[in-house]
Amino acid sequence: MPRPKMPDSTEATEQILATAVAGIGGARRPGQVVMAAEVEETFAAGQHVLVQAGTGTGKSLGYLAPALAKLVAEPESRVVIATATLALQAQLASKDIPAAVAACEEVTGAVVRHAVLKGRSNYVCLLKVRDGQGEEQAALLPETGQTSDLGAEVLQLRSWAEEQAESGALGDRDDAPGHSPAAWAQVSVPVRECLGVQRCPQGAACLVEKSRQLARGSQLVVTNHALLAIDALHGGTALPEYDALVIDEAHELVSRVTGAASVELSPSTVERVAKRCLSWLSDDTGLDFLDAADALQTGLDAGEVGRVTDPDAEVRAAFVAVRDSARAAISGLAGGSDDETERRQAQAAAQEIFDVAERMAKLGEFDVIWVSESDRFGRQANCAPLSVAGLLRNQIFDAHPTVLTSATLKIGGDFTSFAYSLGLGGPADGGYRAVDVGSPFDYGTQGILYVARQLPPPSREGSSPETLAEIAELLWAAEGRTLGLFASQRAAEAAARYCREQLPDRLVLCQGDAHLARLTTEFIEDPEASLFGTLSLWQGIDVPGDTCRLVIIDKIPFPRPDDPLMQARQQAVAEAGGNGFMAVAATHAGLLLAQGAGRLIRTMEDRGVVAVLDPRLVTARYGSFLKASMPDFWMTTDREVAIAALRRLGESA
């Protein structure tokens, strides 16, 4: 069969897109075509572009087509795609990329090699599986001789891991049999405790290394925001070198990178690592390390929960004590033979304690240090970067032309807030282009935004009786079919209790009643059910069709006023002459409102109401900024209009 004539890059992009879309039984959308052209221009010019592509645009193929055209024209180059969620990573790997690669081969005759690359702890560690079965495995077996539930999971995972190694598979956690996090910890290894392929007895068979080799041999690599951040933090050691970058779900990038660059330190962690090191330490060194855990507990208890800025604070002295004792332990663990696996892993764990404690002891101007407290774990110290803009700009954007895309990048009606958070500057700085390719949905006719202006403003005391009554009446009008997005678990539970009492014939599910995946499945399968929950439901849940007729947002999702990191970021903006509230708190709220309201319309046939039960959306000065972040629904403050619209939807169905 003759090889197809190689089209030029623009023609190749257009043909690959058309063929891929047809291959999955769809049709090209105008926004998708515009997006593909913008991405192609970005790759050719070596620039950056921000692309807002509404739900239903088909943005994955919108960037895959020009990426593949580039890789065909430049076979030695590599494009990395970074997603925020494993769900999108899986969709790309199982659906969109195979369709696009097949289309590319049909159009150009070239086969583009591709791979998925995740963080180390997402793969089985064969050293842990094969050499960690002694005392560790025995601890899972009760005296009765019967395997515990955890032990049974671990045994199943070990058997599966051997099958993976024998078959040449990668031992990816997503492919594993059902398991708990505790069971997975028995067959995987933290990054810092990995011995490295050269020193590990199982290095020749290492599945993580195999995944890295596949990525190095591929032109198109799909990874996640966290691994992209780790690569930037550690000088490009996590990903193979690449020439262009696509960041999907880009609205999540700052929070994911912040998370990857953040660390915690607790007395229990220090004590656990110290005990792990005792076998190889002198009595004095081991005792000092154990005592450091007590010193940290004393320091944490001595002050208030919140940010730590005083260099004379007792907790800061505790950080120094932990750092110094960990340094001594590292020295005591040095030496030994290469086959002392446990000793080397204990040393790596002590090194991590040292690094974290040293970072906290510095109280650096670019870090925010604070003490938090939970009922389950007590107090711990936390450290996060004040800003990740410099890291993103210097280690990622300065080195690679980048496409950043999401359904929600325009906060307050433009891209400026988002661009500043990434270190790209303002529109006049010329560091990027920005385009909104629109949405295939007609929000103005498909949905109504109802703002309950008549309700009292939210308070810290919980939902008012008026608000609870409003929720129940809306749910009644919608005949169930409601996704309730709440600012706190307490508010979600209170609303669920009230609606169950007032509407006993309606099934109201609440986050926390069972595993969220199970609740979501039940919500989708029962059209008249309702699901109430918090932050994890604001983003990522996709419920098209008549199952979700109503989205309730109980209050504007500003960050908690006692959040030390957000407080510090607002203060930094204010000290630089900006408006800290608008740049941080309002931007955070606008992004979540956009994401939450976006749960309503997922297909061309969807109809419904988004009800915001916080009057500040129309009464406060910042309300217009927040509303401009949301889809352009037709808006009303008249409850009867919203109720009537929901009732009509039920009658027409």
Image: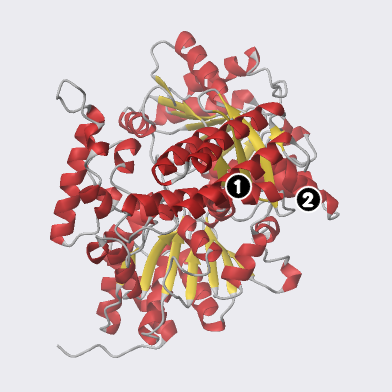
Quarter of the picture containing the N terminus is bottom left
- Relative to 503, does residue 413 appear above or below in the rendering? below
Residue farthest to the front, as pictured: 283
Amino acid identity at mark 2: Ala
In the image shown, does 289 or 268 lie closer to the viewer? 289
Q: Which residue is mark 2?
A: 572
**Residue at the (46%, 70%) spot, across then down:** 33
Q: Is residue 376 something that shows in the picture? A: yes
**Count of numbered tags:** 2
- Relative to 105, does residue 326 appear above or below in the rendering? above
In the image shown, does 178 or 540 lie closer to the viewer? 178
- Relative to 521, does residue 220 appear above or below in the rendering? below
Classify mark 1: helix, strand or loop. helix
Amino acid identity at mark 1: Arg
Which mark is on residue 294?
Answer: none
Give the image location of residue 44, x and y in percent.
Answer: 52, 83
**Residue at the (49%, 29%) spot, across then down:** 533
Q: Which quadrant of the view contains residue 3?
A: bottom left
Q: Is residue 630 something that shows in the picture? A: no
Q: Nearer the viewer, mark 1 or mark 2?
A: 1
**Residue at the (44%, 54%) spot, across then down:** 192
Query: In the image, is 121 to the left or to the right of 243?
Result: left
Quarter of the picture containing the C terminus is top left
Q: Which residue is mark 1?
A: 323
Query: In the image, is 579 to the left or to the right of 66?
Result: right
Q: Which quadrant of the view contains residue 147?
A: top left
